[in-house]
C-alpha cells in the first residue's frame, strides 16, 4: 500500500477489511486490506506527525492523534470529523474498550493526564490525573472495568473506570514504560520498560481480595488476649490490655 508522501509512524487494523496508517506529515490514510486501495485521506494536523490511530470495534470510527496533542474522532464512512480535542501532551497511544462506548487516550487537558472519552459522541467523560510524566501506554481490561496507564518516569496506575479513581499506583520501573497490558482475565498487568525489564503485577478486584491474598503470605501471631482466651501460654513480656 503506497500513497503517503512522507514516512509512516503508525499502522492498525480495523473491523473487516479496514486498516489505517499515520504519516509524519500530519495525515492519516484508510485502506481496503483486500484490494490495497486507499479509501480516505484524513488531514489531522498538517506538519505534525500522526502518532496514534485506533479503530472502534465496529470500524465505524477511527481516532487519530498527533505529536502536537491534537486529537480527532472520524467517521470512517464519510471521513467527517465527529469530535476534535486539544491535549496538553502528545497522545502516544489510545484504545477503545471492547464495546466501543469508551475511548482511553494517553493525554489530557492538563500535562501528564489521561482522558476517558465517550467513544460515540466524543465527549470528555473524565480526566485521569496523578502521573508525573507523559503517558506512553494505555489499555483496558476485559469489559473495561479497569484501565492501566504507564508513563515516561516508570510509573504505572490502574484505574477503576466506574469511579474514575486510581486503585493501584506503582513505581514500576527506572525508565519509560513503553507498554502496560492487562491479561485476558484482567487479573494481572504486564509492563515493559526502557530499563530492560518486564514486570507482572496482580490486580485485586476488591479490598477483600487483597486481604485474602495477603493472608497466604503474612501469617499473624495471636494477640496476648487471644492467647489467654484459648488457654495458651503468653510469650515473655506479653500483657493482655483488657
Image (tube, helix red, strand yellow):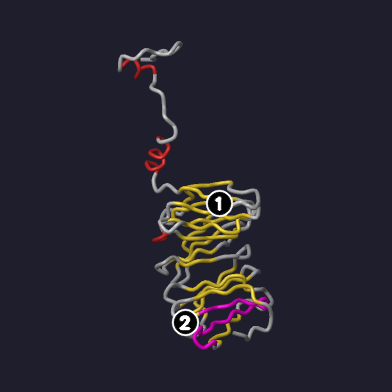
Which residue sits at x=54%, y=88%?
37
Splitting the image into 4 quarters, where does residue 210 fall? top left
**Would you say residue 21 sits in the magenta stretch?**
yes
Of the numbered discs 2 and 1, the one sitting upstream in the chain is 2
Element carrying mark 2: loop
Magenta stretch in the rendered image: 19-36
Question: Height in image: 126 above or below 207?
Answer: below
Of labels 2 and 1, the one closer to you: 2
The quarter of the image holding the C terminus is top left
Which residue sits at x=64%, y=83%?
4
Q: Position of residue 62 (x, y in %)?
A: 50, 75
Splitting the image into 4 quarters, where does residue 149 fall? bottom right
Splitting the image into 4 quarters, where does residue 108 fall? bottom right
Question: Height in image: 114 above or below 69?
Answer: above
Q: Residue furthest left?
A: 230
The quarter of the image holding the N terminus is bottom right
Q: Are marks 2 and 1 in contact (CB under 8 Å)?
A: no
Which residue sits at x=63%, y=86%?
3
Q: For this view, does 193 lie left or right of residue 159?
A: right
**Would you say residue 12 sits in the magenta stretch?**
no
Question: Circle 2 is placed at which residue position?
Answer: 17
Q: For this view, does 166 lie left or right of residue 196?
A: left
Q: For this view, does 167 lie left or right of residue 113?
A: left
Amino acid at each position: 500500500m503506497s500513497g503517503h508522501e512522507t514516512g509512516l509512524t503508525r499502522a492498525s487494523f480495523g473491523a473487516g477489511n479496514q486498516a489505517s496508517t499515520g504519516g509524519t506529515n500530519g495525515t492519516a490514510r484508510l485502506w481496503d486490506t483486500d484490494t490495497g486501495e486507499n479509501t480516505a485521506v484524513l488531514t489531522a494536523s498538517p506538519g505534525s506527525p500522526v502518532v496514534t490511530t485506533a479503530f472502534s470495534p465496529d470500524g465505524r470510527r477511527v481516532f487519530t492523534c498527533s505529536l502536537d496533542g491534537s486529537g480527532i474522532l472520524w467517521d470512517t464512512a464519510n471521513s467527517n470529523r465527529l469530535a476534535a480535542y486539544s491535549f496538553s501532551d502528545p497522545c502516544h497511544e489510545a484504545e477503545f474498550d471492547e464495546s466501543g462506548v469508551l475511548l482511553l487516550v494517553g493525554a489530557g487537558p492538563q500535562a501528564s493526564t489521561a482522558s476517558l472519552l465517550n467513544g460515540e459522541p466524543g465527549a470528555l467523560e473524565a480526566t485521569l490525573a496523578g502521573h508525573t510524566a507523559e503517558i506512553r501506554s494505555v489499555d483496558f481490561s476485559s469489559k473495561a472495568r479497569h484501565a492501566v496507564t504507564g508513563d515516561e518516569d516508570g510509573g504505572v496506575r490502574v484505574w477503576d473506570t466506574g469511579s474514575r479513581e486510581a486503585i493501584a499506583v506503582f513505581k514500576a520501573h527506572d525508565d519509560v514504560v513503553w507498554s502496560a497490558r492487562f491479561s485476558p482475565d484482567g487479573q494481572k498487568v504486564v509492563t515493559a520498560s526502557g530499563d530492560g525489564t518486564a514486570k507482572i503485577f496482580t490486580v485485586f478486584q476488591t479490598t477483600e481480595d487483597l486481604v485474602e491474598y495477603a493472608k497466604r503470605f503474612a501469617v499473624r501471631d495471636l494477640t496476648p488476649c487471644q492467647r489467654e482466651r484459648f488457654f495458651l501460654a503468653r510469650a515473655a513480656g506479653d500483657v493482655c490490655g483488657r
